Every structure is written in C-alpha cells, then in structure tokens.
Image (cartoon, rainbow, N blue to C red):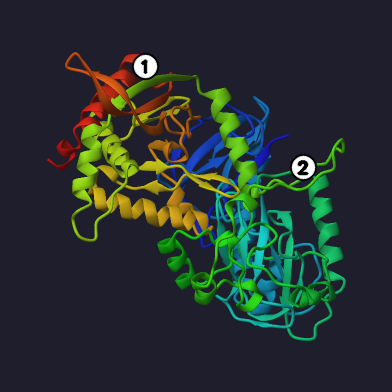
Amino acid sequence: MAIVVNMPRLSDTMEEGTVATWLKKVGDKVEEGDILAEIETDKATMEFESFNEGTLLHIGVQEGETTKVDELLAIIGEEGEDISDLLNGSSSTETKKEESKEVAQEPTESKEETTADVDLPEGVIVVTMPRLSDTMEEGTVAKWLKKVGDEVSEGDILAEIETDKATMEFESFQSGTLLQIGLKEGESAKVDSLLAIIGPAGTDVSGVAANFNKSVDKKEEAPKKAEAPKAETPKVSDTTPKQETPKASKPVASVSSNGRLFASPLAKKIAEEKGIDLSEVQGSGDNGRIVKSDVENFVPAASSAASVGKFVPMGQEDFEDVPNSQMRKAIAKALTNSKFSAPHYYLSVEFDMDNAIAFRAQFNTIPDTKISYNDIVVKACALALKQHPQVNSQWFPDKMRLNNHVHIGVAVAVPDGLVVPVVKFANEQSLPQIGAAVKDLAGKARNKKLTPADMEGSTFTVSNLGMFGIDTFTSIINQPNSAILSVGNIVEKPVVKNGQIVVGNTMKLSLACDHRTVDGATGAQFLQTLKGYIENPVTMLV
C-alpha cells in the first residue's frame, strides 16, 4: 500500500523546508534508512532518510521548491501502484488545511487541533516529544526546567532533551500552567510520545493521557504514513504529578542519571584551566550543581583508587546492564552502515616530525598563542584537500560530489561515545583560529552543548588517538565523507638520515578511503601532499 511522505520538521523552529537535492528519482527502489533528499531548513541543509521501503512513485516538491511542514513531499509504494486517489486526496487535504487555518485564528480552536482525535478540556495542550535532529527517533529528558504547577510562557524552556547527537533546550510554544509531566528525568520515549500537559491552572487532566495513548495506539494499527513529527504539537505521558514531586527531595548529585554534568560556566572554565575532570567533583549548589568554590577546593583522589573496580568474591559471576544512550545507538547505526556499505581500504604512512616539533615550540612562544600537533594536522589536511578534491568528495547513488570547500570533522571522545564537531572552512583559518575552534567544540562536546549545526557538513574527518599513547590504528569512515585520517602518537626512535642512524621523532598515520570515490593512487598522492606540509609546517604559513 502506498505511503505518503510529508515534509518533515528537521529543527525545533522549522516551519517550512526547501528541497535542495533529491537523492532518489521516480522509479528508484527505496530501502528503510536510504537518504531520500537533502532538505534546507531555517538552520541548515540536512539529509532526510526514508522510514519506509518500496518504489518512489511520486515527487511532490521539486529541487529548489519550498513547502510547509507536513505538506506532501513524496509517495512511496509498490511498483506500478495506482496513486491517483492519493494525489487527488492531497488537493482536498490542502483545502481542509486552508479551512483549518481560518479556524486557527481563534486561540482555543488552534490548541485543540494539536491533539487531533483526543477530546481535551478547554485550553489544554498536549506536548509531545519533539524531533530535534534529522536522525532522532527517540529522546531522553535530561532535565526539567519547569515543575508541575509552574506557569509557562511561550518561549520558556520546558526541558533539556538528549537526542542522538546532543542535549538541546526545548522551548514551549504555548502559555499556561504545567499540569502534568509524562517523563521523569533520565527516561526515554519515541518522537511524538507524550511529554507534558499545559493548560489553565486547576484543570483536571487525569484522563487525557490515557485517551491520548489510545488514540496513538489506533494510529499505529492503521497503515502508517511517514508524517513529520510536530515540534509545536507537544503531547504527554501518564505519569502523575505525585510521582514528580519526590524528585526534588531526593539526594542531589553533580551528575544526572544519564551522565550529564551540571556545572556553572565559571566552574567549567576554571576546571578547564586547571585540567580538572568535572565528573570527579561533587557539587554543592542547587540540585548538585558544581560551582566555582567546588572546583577551587577540589582535591583529586589517589589515582590507584580510580582504577579499582567493583569488588566481586572469587568464583562469583557478576555483571551490570547499562542502557544504551541515544548517542550510543546512533553511533552504532551510523558506523555499521558505513562499514558494510562503503568498501574501505587503508593507506599507512610514517612522517618525520622533527621539524613539526621545532615549529610548534617556536610558534607557541608568541604571546597568548598555543597550538597543538592536532591543529597542525587539521590545517595540513585542509590545505592538502584543496589540491585533491577527490579525497574531499561524497558518494551518492547517481553521482559523486567534489566539494570545493573544506569542512573538517574532528572526532572527540565523550562519556557516551564519540561525536564529530566540524571546523568550517578550515583551509581559510590560521593555526591559532583552528586551535581555538577545536578547543571550543571539544568543550561543548564534553558538556553536551553541541548543536546539530556544530556537527553537520563535514567533508573529511580527523581522528587522533596519539594523546592516549596509540601508535597506529584505523578508523571507520564518517559518511558521507570519502575518507578519514587516523593520527597516532609521536614516537622517539632510531631513524636513518643521510646514511646515519640518529635519534628521530616519527608519527604514523592511516588513511581510510571509500574505494567508490578514492582510488589507491589518489589517496597516495594526497598523503604525499600532506607529508610536505606536516614535515615542513612553515610552508603552511605562506
């Protein structure tokens, strides 16, 4: 049976979208997870993947055209299936929507529209889990910033929600009293699940959640349509206010149940300057928030204590199940897809780092300047990519895109896994600018403050494990990139120079390439250019 795919809501403020590129054409087979199109939102151009399988029977919005969220985007079904009824129905649907817009001029009526089949008390709004990233399928409530009984104004931040990419603030699109909270902090739910209820103070909403759940169950039993979740269509769960109240009286800690740190900006800055791991600091502020004095008075525990695991008696089996975070699920899905869809091959090289060591030491004598070896590698890659656009490319089923701009993703390890914030136009930035950008992005990553805009658009990726003492390793390509560079540790060892064995410093790098876009000779030529920059970094200043 044919399925109507509507324009999705790919950002919390998106009201309409423009189709930048169709990656499938009418008649193409579509698998679940395939990228249908690139859609330009109010914030960025994002990939939109299919949640259905079949044949692309109809495209409703051409490249460059714009339409509102929830309008017809495409139709997917069986090859040769008659979709005339759906196409005729779309026009009548548009008429109904126009009529509903006129009714929506009255505030009460428009609010009731948000919950479709559920009868609500007057003025009551059901708030659902919003889709805050293009790949988000479910979200976790990291923190509620309002509690039951609080007054909520339009634009107030209701909660911080952890997606598969970052922890983001979710603002209310309605005003009223927060009558019910559907998910506790640390709990997860799928997009469009019940999140909260807002309405006039004192309104009885005890039956709203149950009715809403029944309505959702009926919709799931009916033929599914790939309709976009509505961020401003907030909806709720059946947890009662009584369950929410005890939360404030529980012992507080600096880390939430999902691993998120609560610390003041000043505390984070001081901790970064002193090299203190905030996860080891006990907060004394409200709700366990880490404040300036906590960091200044922090005394690190003995390193031996940190390495001691849980005591388990001899001969006794023991384990602990740790729920997968949204980020961990997204990483698993993306890397599995990359590893088994892109034909990887690897090129390994070893560079002489003597000049780079001397260059960095001299460069860092400039007042208020400090660059790392990773900054040198990022800059060198950016310059080399301009000379080898094939390595700076992306693969699509019907074409290969050679990017003339250079956006380098820098892999950053965080407690929940790995994120890849992006240094935009890296080839146009100086070494200090790259250093500042990487430091800022890494800090935001560790504090879960990265936005989707911080992590999208990369054309190449650098992963560095040298600081952990790793000499050599290979990485999985961060699609849709065509390559990723793995950077190892700088090792002091005997080397041969001018026929003599002397003490030298070398670094091993491995380039993973997608053989669909980057041939072996092309990858080798890129590494030769990279070698020239890294072994003679002064050439990057010309």
Q: CA distance from mark 1 to mark 2?
A: 45 Å
Query: Is residue 91 placed above or below 399 in the rendered structure?
Result: below
Residue count near mark 2 (Cα–Cα under 10 Å), binned few <14, some 14–19, many ≥20: few
Above or below: residue 260 compared with residue 520: below
Q: Kindly identify which numbered label has been placed on residue 519.
A: 1
**Type of amino acid at the residue the image marks with label 2:** Pro
Residue placed farthest to the left in the image?
542
- Identity, as a three-letter code, of the amino acid under mark 1: Asp
Q: Which mark is residue 223?
A: 2
Residue for point 62% across, 61% down: 161
> Which image quadrant is residue 52 in?
top right
| Residue placed most toward the observer, 487 or 314 | 314
Residue 471, image x and y in percent? Answer: 43, 29
Place of residue 380 in the rendered image (x, y in percent of width and height, measured from the top left): 26, 36
Q: Nearer the viewer, mark 1 or mark 2?
A: 1
Residues 100 and 176: in front is: 176
Looking at the figure, which quarter contains the C terminus?
A: top left
